Amino acid sequence: MSRDPRILLQQVDEAAAEIEQYVDGLDYAEFSGHRMMQGSVKYNFIVIGEALNRLGQISPGLANRIPELRQIVDFRNQMAHGYHQVELDEVWDAAVNHLPDLRQTAQSLLAELELAAEAEQTSDKAEDTFDPFRPLSPFD
């Protein structure tokens, strides 16, 4: 299990991108007639829900910034454990109407974390740089 929230958010983004590719240009009738595509979309929703569930465990503050996180995880659980209870129109609605906002949120949070990681690396490098003009301390 990954302990890095960036990896989990990347998984959300990648799975959402796959779903968007599957449903792009389709209407509900076309989607409902293509069982293999339905299975791929459902699988990727399971990936998203699992990644967000793990994010909630390792970084609750970050996870709380994702709207409807609990509902997304519950949707994942329903698909993974009670797949016969998930209506196809719910899957379609989530893919078309809710997924773009979730993906945007995941990308924004990921960008924030990447900037913070870069800033931390930069400050670590600055501390490690030898400055010949800096007075030496007895604690160096």
Image (cartoon, helix red, strand yellow):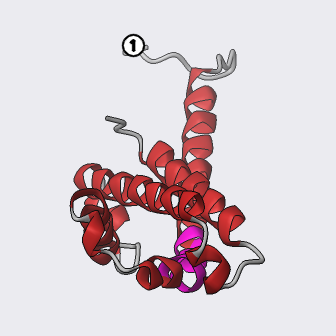
Percent across and percent down for residue 126 are 63, 30
Is residue 95 located in the magenta-colored stretch of the structure?
yes
Q: Residue at x 34, y 38 (%)?
A: 3
Percent across and percent down for residue 139 are 37, 15
Check disc 1 and give the amino acid type.
Answer: Pro
Q: Is residue 44 left or right of residue 139?
A: right
Q: Residue at x 71, y 63 (%)?
A: 21
Q: Quadrant of the N terminus?
A: top left
Percent across and percent down for residue 94 are 48, 79
Which image quadrant for residue 18? bottom right
Q: Is residue 38 left or right of residue 75?
A: right
- Judging from the image, what secondary structure is the residue with disc 1 in? loop
Range of residues picked out in magenta? 94-104
Q: Kindly identify which residue carries mark 1.
A: 138
Q: Residue at x 46, y 76 (%)?
A: 91
Q: Residues within 10 Å of mark 1 (few under 14, many from 20)?
A: few
Of the pair 1 and 128, the residue shown nearer to us: 1
Percent across and percent down for residue 36 are 56, 57
- As drawn, 94 above or below 9: below
Of the pair 138 and 100, the residue shown nearer to us: 100
- As drawn, 132 above or below 97: above
